[in-house]
Image (spheres, grey):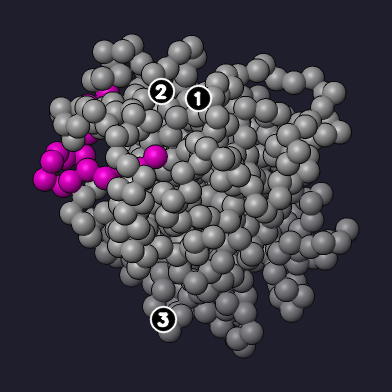
Amino acid sequence: MAGKPLRVLACGDVEGKFDMLFNRVQAVQKKSGEFDLLLCVGNFFGSTPEAEWEEYRTCAKKAPIPTYVLGANNPETVHYFPDVNGCELAENITYLGRKGIFSGTSGLQIAYLSGTESLSEPAPAYSFSSKDVSELKISLLSTPKFKGVDILLTSPWPRGVGNFGNKPGEMDTKRCGSVLISNLATSLKPRYHFAALEKTYYERLPYRNHVVLQENAQHVSRFIALANVGNTSKKKYLYAFSILPMRSMDPAELVKQPQDVTENPYQKSGKEAHQPKMLSGAEEEPACQFFFDLSKQHGKKRPSDGKGGQHSQLKQPKKIHQPTGPCWFCLSSPEVEKHLVVSIGTHSVVELSSEAMEEIDKYKSALKKFFRSKGKRYVLFERNYRSQHLQLQVIPVPLNCCATEDIKESFILQAQEQEIELLEIPEHSDIKQIAQPGTPYFYVELDTGEKLFHRIKKKFPLQFGREVLASEAILNVPGRADWQQCTASRDEAEATAKAFREDFQPFDFSELQ
Protein backbone atom coordinates (compact mmCIF):
# COMPACT_ATOMS: atom_id res chain seq x y z
CA MET A 1 0.00 0.00 0.00
CA ALA A 2 2.83 2.41 0.91
CA GLY A 3 4.65 4.15 -1.92
CA LYS A 4 7.83 6.19 -1.97
CA PRO A 5 7.93 9.23 0.36
CA LEU A 6 8.35 12.64 -1.24
CA ARG A 7 11.26 14.80 -0.16
CA VAL A 8 10.06 18.36 0.34
CA LEU A 9 11.65 21.69 1.20
CA ALA A 10 9.64 24.54 2.75
CA CYS A 11 10.85 28.13 2.89
CA GLY A 12 9.85 31.33 4.70
CA ASP A 13 9.85 34.89 3.36
CA VAL A 14 12.15 35.06 0.31
CA GLU A 15 11.69 38.85 -0.05
CA GLY A 16 13.32 38.89 -3.47
CA LYS A 17 16.53 37.13 -2.41
CA PHE A 18 16.19 34.48 -5.11
CA ASP A 19 19.88 33.77 -5.70
CA MET A 20 20.52 33.32 -1.99
CA LEU A 21 17.59 30.89 -1.68
CA PHE A 22 18.32 28.78 -4.74
CA ASN A 23 22.05 28.63 -3.99
CA ARG A 24 21.13 27.30 -0.57
CA VAL A 25 18.76 24.74 -2.11
CA GLN A 26 21.52 23.54 -4.45
CA ALA A 27 23.92 23.20 -1.50
CA VAL A 28 21.35 21.16 0.44
CA GLN A 29 20.74 18.86 -2.52
CA LYS A 30 24.44 18.37 -3.07
CA LYS A 31 24.83 17.29 0.54
CA SER A 32 21.58 15.37 1.11
CA GLY A 33 20.37 14.30 -2.33
CA GLU A 34 17.60 15.49 -4.64
CA PHE A 35 14.31 16.95 -3.37
CA ASP A 36 11.00 16.79 -5.21
CA LEU A 37 9.66 20.29 -4.65
CA LEU A 38 10.10 23.59 -2.80
CA LEU A 39 7.15 25.33 -1.10
CA CYS A 40 7.43 29.06 -0.30
CA VAL A 41 5.21 30.88 2.22
CA GLY A 42 5.24 34.53 3.25
CA ASN A 43 6.56 37.33 1.03
CA PHE A 44 8.13 35.81 -2.09
CA PHE A 45 8.85 39.24 -3.59
CA GLY A 46 10.35 42.14 -1.68
CA SER A 47 11.53 45.71 -2.02
CA THR A 48 14.81 44.66 -3.65
CA PRO A 49 15.59 45.80 -7.23
CA GLU A 50 13.79 43.76 -9.89
CA ALA A 51 16.98 42.98 -11.82
CA GLU A 52 17.48 39.72 -9.92
CA TRP A 53 13.92 38.56 -10.60
CA GLU A 54 14.21 39.60 -14.25
CA GLU A 55 16.95 36.99 -14.74
CA TYR A 56 14.56 34.24 -13.61
CA ARG A 57 11.57 35.66 -15.49
CA THR A 58 13.49 35.70 -18.76
CA CYS A 59 14.96 32.24 -18.13
CA ALA A 60 18.53 33.56 -17.88
CA LYS A 61 18.48 31.70 -14.55
CA LYS A 62 16.34 28.77 -13.44
CA ALA A 63 15.08 27.49 -10.10
CA PRO A 64 16.88 24.18 -9.35
CA ILE A 65 13.67 22.31 -8.41
CA PRO A 66 9.91 22.85 -8.99
CA THR A 67 8.99 25.78 -6.74
CA TYR A 68 5.46 26.70 -5.64
CA VAL A 69 4.72 30.07 -4.05
CA LEU A 70 1.86 31.91 -2.36
CA GLY A 71 0.54 35.28 -3.56
CA ALA A 72 0.94 38.88 -2.42
CA ASN A 73 0.60 40.04 1.20
CA ASN A 74 0.72 43.76 0.39
CA PRO A 75 -0.40 46.07 -2.46
CA GLU A 76 3.18 46.72 -3.62
CA THR A 77 3.72 43.17 -4.87
CA VAL A 78 0.28 42.40 -6.39
CA HIS A 79 1.50 43.15 -9.92
CA TYR A 80 3.84 40.14 -9.84
CA PHE A 81 0.81 37.81 -9.80
CA PRO A 82 -1.19 38.37 -13.04
CA ASP A 83 -3.69 35.52 -12.61
CA VAL A 84 -5.63 35.06 -9.35
CA ASN A 85 -6.16 31.40 -10.21
CA GLY A 86 -2.44 30.71 -10.36
CA CYS A 87 0.10 30.66 -13.18
CA GLU A 88 3.72 30.04 -14.05
CA LEU A 89 5.81 33.05 -13.05
CA ALA A 90 9.10 31.73 -14.43
CA GLU A 91 10.58 28.40 -15.43
CA ASN A 92 10.16 26.01 -12.45
CA ILE A 93 8.40 28.72 -10.38
CA THR A 94 4.61 28.50 -10.08
CA TYR A 95 2.13 30.77 -8.30
CA LEU A 96 -0.48 28.51 -6.71
CA GLY A 97 -3.32 31.06 -6.67
CA ARG A 98 -5.55 32.85 -4.14
CA LYS A 99 -6.85 29.64 -2.55
CA GLY A 100 -7.30 26.02 -3.47
CA ILE A 101 -5.96 22.47 -3.45
CA PHE A 102 -2.87 21.28 -5.27
CA SER A 103 -2.62 17.53 -5.84
CA GLY A 104 0.31 15.95 -7.59
CA THR A 105 0.47 12.58 -9.31
CA SER A 106 1.83 11.12 -6.08
CA GLY A 107 -1.46 11.89 -4.32
CA LEU A 108 0.09 14.49 -2.01
CA GLN A 109 -2.64 17.00 -1.15
CA ILE A 110 -1.61 20.59 -0.46
CA ALA A 111 -4.17 23.20 0.62
CA TYR A 112 -3.15 26.85 0.26
CA LEU A 113 -4.45 30.30 1.12
CA SER A 114 -2.65 33.42 -0.11
CA GLY A 115 -2.55 36.85 1.51
CA THR A 116 -3.31 38.30 4.93
CA GLU A 117 -6.66 38.40 6.73
CA SER A 118 -9.10 41.09 5.61
CA LEU A 119 -12.03 42.39 7.64
CA SER A 120 -13.87 43.62 4.57
CA GLU A 121 -15.76 42.04 1.67
CA PRO A 122 -14.67 41.73 -1.02
CA ALA A 123 -11.09 41.31 0.15
CA PRO A 124 -8.36 43.19 -1.71
CA ALA A 125 -6.09 41.23 -4.04
CA TYR A 126 -3.49 40.72 -1.32
CA SER A 127 -5.90 39.46 1.35
CA PHE A 128 -8.44 36.74 2.12
CA SER A 129 -11.82 36.96 3.81
CA SER A 130 -14.06 34.68 5.85
CA LYS A 131 -15.84 33.85 2.59
CA ASP A 132 -12.58 32.64 1.05
CA VAL A 133 -11.90 30.43 4.07
CA SER A 134 -15.44 29.02 4.04
CA GLU A 135 -15.24 28.18 0.33
CA LEU A 136 -11.92 26.41 0.80
CA LYS A 137 -13.24 24.43 3.77
CA ILE A 138 -16.43 23.40 1.94
CA SER A 139 -14.51 22.22 -1.12
CA LEU A 140 -12.60 19.77 1.06
CA LEU A 141 -15.07 18.83 3.79
CA SER A 142 -17.62 17.81 1.15
CA THR A 143 -15.20 15.14 -0.08
CA PRO A 144 -16.34 11.63 0.96
CA LYS A 145 -14.35 10.19 3.88
CA PHE A 146 -12.28 13.35 4.26
CA LYS A 147 -9.60 12.86 6.94
CA GLY A 148 -7.45 15.93 6.42
CA VAL A 149 -4.79 17.32 4.09
CA ASP A 150 -1.11 16.50 3.93
CA ILE A 151 0.10 20.10 3.90
CA LEU A 152 -1.44 23.54 4.53
CA LEU A 153 0.34 26.67 3.29
CA THR A 154 -0.54 30.13 4.65
CA SER A 155 1.47 33.29 5.10
CA PRO A 156 0.11 34.49 8.49
CA TRP A 157 0.32 32.34 11.60
CA PRO A 158 -2.87 30.90 13.07
CA ARG A 159 -4.03 32.75 16.20
CA GLY A 160 -3.40 30.80 19.43
CA VAL A 161 -1.06 28.20 17.94
CA GLY A 162 1.09 28.28 21.09
CA ASN A 163 -1.75 27.12 23.39
CA PHE A 164 -0.88 23.89 25.26
CA GLY A 165 2.49 23.73 23.52
CA ASN A 166 6.03 25.06 23.60
CA LYS A 167 6.25 28.85 23.39
CA PRO A 168 7.71 30.66 20.34
CA GLY A 169 10.10 32.93 22.19
CA GLU A 170 8.75 36.44 22.66
CA MET A 171 5.85 35.95 20.23
CA ASP A 172 2.42 36.26 21.86
CA THR A 173 0.37 33.77 19.86
CA LYS A 174 -2.81 34.77 21.71
CA ARG A 175 -2.66 38.20 20.10
CA CYS A 176 -0.87 37.76 16.77
CA GLY A 177 -1.94 35.68 13.81
CA SER A 178 -5.25 35.06 12.09
CA VAL A 179 -8.36 33.61 13.73
CA LEU A 180 -9.63 32.58 10.28
CA ILE A 181 -6.51 30.50 9.73
CA SER A 182 -6.97 28.88 13.15
CA ASN A 183 -10.47 27.88 12.05
CA LEU A 184 -9.14 26.64 8.73
CA ALA A 185 -6.48 24.50 10.39
CA THR A 186 -9.08 23.10 12.80
CA SER A 187 -11.21 21.90 9.86
CA LEU A 188 -8.52 20.80 7.41
CA LYS A 189 -6.36 18.94 9.97
CA PRO A 190 -3.09 19.33 8.04
CA ARG A 191 -0.26 16.95 8.87
CA TYR A 192 2.10 19.87 8.21
CA HIS A 193 1.19 23.56 8.35
CA PHE A 194 3.76 26.15 7.22
CA ALA A 195 3.58 29.93 7.73
CA ALA A 196 5.92 32.95 7.85
CA LEU A 197 5.79 36.80 8.02
CA GLU A 198 6.98 37.02 11.66
CA LYS A 199 10.69 36.70 10.80
CA THR A 200 11.30 33.91 13.29
CA TYR A 201 11.56 30.13 13.36
CA TYR A 202 9.13 28.14 15.48
CA GLU A 203 8.42 24.42 15.35
CA ARG A 204 5.49 23.67 17.59
CA LEU A 205 5.06 20.33 19.32
CA PRO A 206 2.69 18.08 17.34
CA TYR A 207 -0.95 18.34 18.37
CA ARG A 208 -3.80 15.85 18.16
CA ASN A 209 -6.95 16.21 16.08
CA HIS A 210 -9.27 14.13 18.27
CA VAL A 211 -10.63 14.21 21.80
CA VAL A 212 -8.94 11.57 23.96
CA LEU A 213 -11.26 8.80 25.21
CA GLN A 214 -14.18 10.32 23.29
CA GLU A 215 -13.20 10.00 19.62
CA ASN A 216 -11.22 7.55 17.52
CA ALA A 217 -7.55 8.42 17.16
CA GLN A 218 -6.64 10.64 14.20
CA HIS A 219 -3.33 11.78 12.75
CA VAL A 220 -1.41 14.59 14.45
CA SER A 221 -0.63 18.02 13.01
CA ARG A 222 2.68 19.86 13.02
CA PHE A 223 2.94 23.64 12.72
CA ILE A 224 6.23 25.16 11.52
CA ALA A 225 6.86 28.90 11.11
CA LEU A 226 9.93 29.84 9.07
CA ALA A 227 12.14 32.93 9.21
CA ASN A 228 13.12 35.17 6.29
CA VAL A 229 15.86 34.19 3.83
CA GLY A 230 19.30 35.53 4.71
CA ASN A 231 18.28 36.91 8.11
CA THR A 232 21.25 38.20 10.14
CA SER A 233 20.16 36.22 13.23
CA LYS A 234 20.66 33.02 11.25
CA LYS A 235 17.21 31.78 12.17
CA LYS A 236 16.04 28.76 10.21
CA TYR A 237 14.27 29.64 6.97
CA LEU A 238 14.55 26.34 5.06
CA TYR A 239 12.92 23.17 6.39
CA ALA A 240 13.47 19.71 4.88
CA PHE A 241 11.18 16.74 5.46
CA SER A 242 9.92 13.53 3.88
CA ILE A 243 6.22 12.77 3.62
CA LEU A 244 4.19 9.85 2.34
CA PRO A 245 0.77 10.99 1.05
CA MET A 246 -2.01 10.27 3.51
CA ARG A 247 -3.95 8.18 1.03
CA SER A 248 -0.97 5.84 0.61
CA MET A 249 -0.39 5.24 4.32
CA ASP A 250 -1.45 2.32 6.48
CA PRO A 251 -4.30 3.66 8.70
CA ALA A 252 -2.68 2.41 11.91
CA GLU A 253 0.62 4.03 10.99
CA LEU A 254 -1.10 7.30 10.11
CA VAL A 255 -2.74 7.75 13.54
CA LYS A 256 0.30 6.87 15.67
CA GLN A 257 0.70 9.45 18.43
CA PRO A 258 4.23 10.69 19.25
CA GLN A 259 5.29 10.95 22.89
CA ASP A 260 5.33 14.76 22.86
CA VAL A 261 1.85 15.23 21.35
CA THR A 262 -0.30 17.98 22.92
CA GLU A 263 -3.94 19.04 22.87
CA ASN A 264 -5.27 20.93 19.87
CA PRO A 265 -4.31 24.61 20.36
CA TYR A 266 -7.41 25.83 18.51
CA GLN A 267 -9.96 24.02 20.66
CA LYS A 268 -11.66 27.32 21.46
CA SER A 269 -11.99 28.37 17.84
CA GLY A 270 -13.09 24.85 16.96
CA LYS A 271 -15.04 24.49 20.17
CA GLU A 272 -18.30 23.40 18.61
CA ALA A 273 -16.61 20.33 17.18
CA HIS A 274 -15.21 19.15 20.50
CA GLN A 275 -17.56 20.11 23.31
CA PRO A 276 -21.17 19.24 24.13
CA LYS A 277 -23.79 21.93 23.86
CA MET A 278 -23.92 23.92 27.08
CA LEU A 279 -26.74 25.82 28.70
CA SER A 280 -26.49 29.58 28.22
CA GLY A 281 -24.68 31.77 30.73
CA ALA A 282 -25.66 32.68 34.27
CA GLU A 283 -24.72 35.38 36.74
CA GLU A 284 -21.14 35.38 37.88
CA GLU A 285 -20.28 34.65 41.49
CA PRO A 286 -19.09 37.46 43.75
CA ALA A 287 -15.33 37.81 44.03
CA CYS A 288 -15.43 36.59 47.65
CA GLN A 289 -16.58 33.11 46.62
CA PHE A 290 -13.86 30.49 46.09
CA PHE A 291 -15.53 27.32 44.89
CA PHE A 292 -16.22 25.32 41.73
CA ASP A 293 -19.72 23.91 41.38
CA LEU A 294 -19.60 20.77 39.26
CA SER A 295 -22.84 19.40 40.61
CA LYS A 296 -25.43 21.85 39.28
CA GLN A 297 -26.31 23.31 35.91
CA HIS A 298 -23.58 21.76 33.79
CA GLY A 299 -21.39 24.33 32.12
CA LYS A 300 -22.73 27.24 34.20
CA LYS A 301 -21.40 29.24 37.10
CA ARG A 302 -23.47 28.64 40.21
CA PRO A 303 -25.44 31.80 41.17
CA SER A 304 -24.24 33.39 44.39
CA ASP A 305 -27.69 33.17 46.00
CA GLY A 306 -27.78 29.41 45.46
CA LYS A 307 -30.83 29.62 43.18
CA GLY A 308 -31.19 28.68 39.56
CA GLY A 309 -31.80 32.25 38.36
CA GLN A 310 -33.58 32.92 35.09
CA HIS A 311 -32.61 29.55 33.64
CA SER A 312 -33.95 27.48 36.53
CA GLN A 313 -36.93 26.29 34.50
CA LEU A 314 -34.74 24.74 31.81
CA LYS A 315 -34.51 20.98 31.73
CA GLN A 316 -31.60 19.93 33.93
CA PRO A 317 -29.09 17.19 33.07
CA LYS A 318 -29.05 13.99 35.08
CA LYS A 319 -28.39 14.80 38.72
CA ILE A 320 -25.12 13.53 40.12
CA HIS A 321 -24.13 12.86 43.72
CA GLN A 322 -24.32 15.76 46.18
CA PRO A 323 -22.12 15.99 49.26
CA THR A 324 -23.96 14.65 52.29
CA GLY A 325 -22.43 16.85 54.99
CA PRO A 326 -21.12 20.36 55.65
CA CYS A 327 -18.44 21.68 53.34
CA TRP A 328 -14.86 21.66 54.66
CA PHE A 329 -13.40 23.55 51.71
CA CYS A 330 -15.63 26.54 50.97
CA LEU A 331 -14.06 29.70 52.41
CA SER A 332 -17.48 31.07 53.30
CA SER A 333 -18.38 27.92 55.26
CA PRO A 334 -18.23 27.96 59.08
CA GLU A 335 -16.75 24.45 58.86
CA VAL A 336 -13.63 25.49 56.91
CA GLU A 337 -10.29 25.32 58.74
CA LYS A 338 -9.04 28.73 57.60
CA HIS A 339 -5.90 28.51 59.71
CA LEU A 340 -4.68 25.82 57.32
CA VAL A 341 -5.00 28.05 54.25
CA VAL A 342 -1.56 28.81 52.82
CA SER A 343 -2.32 30.56 49.52
CA ILE A 344 -5.41 31.77 47.64
CA GLY A 345 -5.76 32.30 43.91
CA THR A 346 -8.07 34.73 42.13
CA HIS A 347 -9.94 32.59 39.60
CA SER A 348 -12.94 30.34 40.25
CA VAL A 349 -15.25 29.11 37.48
CA VAL A 350 -16.87 25.83 36.44
CA GLU A 351 -15.36 25.75 32.97
CA LEU A 352 -11.89 27.00 33.76
CA SER A 353 -10.77 29.92 31.65
CA SER A 354 -7.30 30.02 30.16
CA GLU A 355 -6.35 32.50 32.93
CA ALA A 356 -7.52 30.08 35.63
CA MET A 357 -5.65 27.19 34.00
CA GLU A 358 -2.50 29.31 33.83
CA GLU A 359 -2.89 30.09 37.53
CA ILE A 360 -3.26 26.41 38.41
CA ASP A 361 -0.21 25.58 36.31
CA LYS A 362 1.73 28.25 38.23
CA TYR A 363 0.71 26.69 41.54
CA LYS A 364 1.70 23.23 40.34
CA SER A 365 5.04 24.48 39.06
CA ALA A 366 5.69 26.35 42.34
CA LEU A 367 4.84 23.26 44.41
CA LYS A 368 7.09 21.07 42.25
CA LYS A 369 10.03 23.42 42.77
CA PHE A 370 9.30 23.81 46.48
CA PHE A 371 9.10 20.08 47.22
CA ARG A 372 12.19 19.42 45.07
CA SER A 373 14.09 21.90 47.25
CA LYS A 374 13.05 19.74 50.22
CA GLY A 375 14.17 16.48 48.62
CA LYS A 376 10.63 15.40 47.72
CA ARG A 377 8.54 14.76 44.63
CA TYR A 378 4.92 15.75 44.40
CA VAL A 379 1.90 13.60 43.52
CA LEU A 380 -1.30 15.39 42.58
CA PHE A 381 -4.75 13.83 42.39
CA GLU A 382 -8.30 15.04 41.93
CA ARG A 383 -11.56 13.32 42.85
CA ASN A 384 -14.54 14.90 41.14
CA TYR A 385 -17.12 12.75 42.92
CA ARG A 386 -19.56 13.58 45.73
CA SER A 387 -18.10 17.05 45.90
CA GLN A 388 -19.17 20.56 44.95
CA HIS A 389 -15.60 21.66 44.37
CA LEU A 390 -12.60 21.23 42.16
CA GLN A 391 -10.09 19.87 44.71
CA LEU A 392 -6.50 19.28 43.65
CA GLN A 393 -4.77 17.36 46.45
CA VAL A 394 -0.97 17.40 46.46
CA ILE A 395 1.05 14.95 48.56
CA PRO A 396 4.87 15.18 48.85
CA VAL A 397 6.79 11.90 48.75
CA PRO A 398 10.51 11.79 49.77
CA LEU A 399 12.81 11.12 46.81
CA ASN A 400 14.58 8.35 48.72
CA CYS A 401 11.27 6.69 49.59
CA CYS A 402 10.39 5.37 46.13
CA ALA A 403 10.66 6.22 42.46
CA THR A 404 7.89 7.80 40.40
CA GLU A 405 7.49 4.50 38.53
CA ASP A 406 6.83 2.74 41.87
CA ILE A 407 4.12 5.28 42.75
CA LYS A 408 2.52 4.80 39.35
CA GLU A 409 2.60 1.02 39.74
CA SER A 410 1.03 1.24 43.22
CA PHE A 411 -1.90 3.26 41.88
CA ILE A 412 -2.45 0.80 39.03
CA LEU A 413 -2.16 -2.32 41.23
CA GLN A 414 -4.48 -1.03 43.95
CA ALA A 415 -6.94 0.10 41.28
CA GLN A 416 -6.94 -3.40 39.78
CA GLU A 417 -7.54 -4.93 43.22
CA GLN A 418 -10.64 -2.75 43.62
CA GLU A 419 -11.75 -3.27 39.99
CA ILE A 420 -11.10 0.36 39.11
CA GLU A 421 -10.13 0.96 35.48
CA LEU A 422 -7.23 3.40 35.73
CA LEU A 423 -6.04 4.45 32.26
CA GLU A 424 -2.78 6.17 31.36
CA ILE A 425 -3.39 9.23 29.19
CA PRO A 426 -0.91 11.28 27.10
CA GLU A 427 1.27 13.70 29.04
CA HIS A 428 -0.07 16.83 27.31
CA SER A 429 -3.74 15.86 27.53
CA ASP A 430 -6.10 18.55 28.75
CA ILE A 431 -8.45 17.15 31.41
CA LYS A 432 -11.21 19.46 30.13
CA GLN A 433 -11.14 17.60 26.81
CA ILE A 434 -11.37 14.17 28.47
CA ALA A 435 -14.05 14.80 31.10
CA GLN A 436 -17.08 16.90 30.28
CA PRO A 437 -18.40 19.25 32.99
CA GLY A 438 -20.31 17.25 35.59
CA THR A 439 -18.66 13.94 34.72
CA PRO A 440 -17.44 12.12 37.88
CA TYR A 441 -13.79 11.09 37.59
CA PHE A 442 -10.54 10.41 39.46
CA TYR A 443 -7.27 11.77 38.10
CA VAL A 444 -3.60 11.42 39.08
CA GLU A 445 -0.65 13.52 37.88
CA LEU A 446 2.92 12.47 38.71
CA ASP A 447 5.96 14.74 38.88
CA THR A 448 7.18 13.38 35.53
CA GLY A 449 4.02 14.62 33.82
CA GLU A 450 2.56 11.11 33.52
CA LYS A 451 -1.21 11.00 34.07
CA LEU A 452 -3.75 8.36 35.12
CA PHE A 453 -7.51 8.73 34.68
CA HIS A 454 -10.64 6.86 35.80
CA ARG A 455 -14.17 7.73 34.73
CA ILE A 456 -16.39 7.03 37.75
CA LYS A 457 -19.55 5.19 36.71
CA LYS A 458 -20.97 3.87 40.00
CA LYS A 459 -19.30 3.91 43.40
CA PHE A 460 -15.78 5.03 44.15
CA PRO A 461 -13.76 4.91 47.40
CA LEU A 462 -13.55 8.52 48.57
CA GLN A 463 -10.07 8.16 50.10
CA PHE A 464 -8.56 6.06 47.27
CA GLY A 465 -5.79 8.56 46.42
CA ARG A 466 -4.73 8.97 50.03
CA GLU A 467 -5.00 5.24 50.70
CA VAL A 468 -2.55 4.47 47.88
CA LEU A 469 -0.02 7.08 49.04
CA ALA A 470 -0.40 6.21 52.73
CA SER A 471 0.07 2.50 52.04
CA GLU A 472 3.08 0.48 53.14
CA ALA A 473 4.45 0.52 49.58
CA ILE A 474 4.90 4.31 49.61
CA LEU A 475 4.68 6.46 52.79
CA ASN A 476 3.73 3.64 55.19
CA VAL A 477 1.37 5.83 57.25
CA PRO A 478 -1.97 4.01 56.88
CA GLY A 479 -3.46 5.95 59.78
CA ARG A 480 -3.39 9.13 57.67
CA ALA A 481 -5.44 7.74 54.79
CA ASP A 482 -8.57 9.56 56.02
CA TRP A 483 -7.68 13.22 56.63
CA GLN A 484 -10.90 13.77 58.58
CA GLN A 485 -9.58 11.43 61.27
CA CYS A 486 -6.58 13.69 61.93
CA THR A 487 -5.58 13.53 65.62
CA ALA A 488 -3.44 16.68 65.66
CA SER A 489 -4.71 19.53 67.81
CA ARG A 490 -5.63 22.87 66.30
CA ASP A 491 -2.47 24.44 67.74
CA GLU A 492 -0.30 21.70 66.19
CA ALA A 493 -2.03 22.03 62.82
CA GLU A 494 -1.75 25.81 62.91
CA ALA A 495 1.96 25.62 63.72
CA THR A 496 2.52 23.19 60.83
CA ALA A 497 0.61 25.44 58.41
CA LYS A 498 2.58 28.50 59.56
CA ALA A 499 5.90 26.72 59.06
CA PHE A 500 4.83 25.56 55.60
CA ARG A 501 3.66 29.07 54.68
CA GLU A 502 7.01 30.57 55.64
CA ASP A 503 8.96 27.90 53.73
CA PHE A 504 6.70 28.18 50.66
CA GLN A 505 6.67 31.98 50.57
CA PRO A 506 9.70 32.36 48.21
CA PHE A 507 7.95 30.05 45.71
CA ASP A 508 4.44 31.50 46.08
CA PHE A 509 3.42 33.96 43.35
CA SER A 510 0.06 34.87 44.92
CA GLU A 511 -0.93 37.05 47.83
CA LEU A 512 -2.67 35.50 50.82
CA GLN A 513 -6.11 37.02 51.18
Q: What stretch is highlighted in magenta?
A: 393-412
Residue 308 drawn at (x, y percent): 79, 31
Q: In the rendered view, would you say 118 is above or below 395?
A: below
Label 2 Cα crowd, 10 Å radius (few <14 / some 14-19 / many 20+):
some
Quick check: is 395 in the magenta stretch?
A: yes
Which amino acid, by three-letter code, is at mark 3? Ser
Q: Report which residue position mark 1 lands on.
A: 385
Callout 1–callout 2 Cβ contact below 8 Å: yes
Looking at the image, residue 1 sits to the left or right of residue 120; the answer is left
Which amino acid, by three-letter code, is at mark 1? Tyr
Q: Report which residue position mark 2 lands on.
A: 462
The tag earlier along the polypeptide, 2 or 3, is 3
| Measured Cα–Cα span from mark 2 to mark 3 | 56 Å
Looking at the image, residue 129 sits to the left or right of residue 157; the answer is right
View extreme (left): residue: 400
Residue 443 drawn at (x, y percent): 41, 31
- Residue ID at (62%, 27%): 295
The tag earlier along the polypeptide, 3 or 1, is 3
Callout 2–callout 3 Cβ contact below 8 Å: no
Q: In the rendered view, would you say 457 is above or below 129?
A: above
* Nearer to us in this view, 404 or 488: 488
Label 3 Cα crowd, 10 Å radius (few <14 / some 14-19 / many 20+):
few
Q: Nearer the viewer, mark 2 or mark 3?
A: 2
Which amino acid, by three-letter code, is at mark 2? Leu
Q: Report which residue position mark 3 lands on.
A: 233
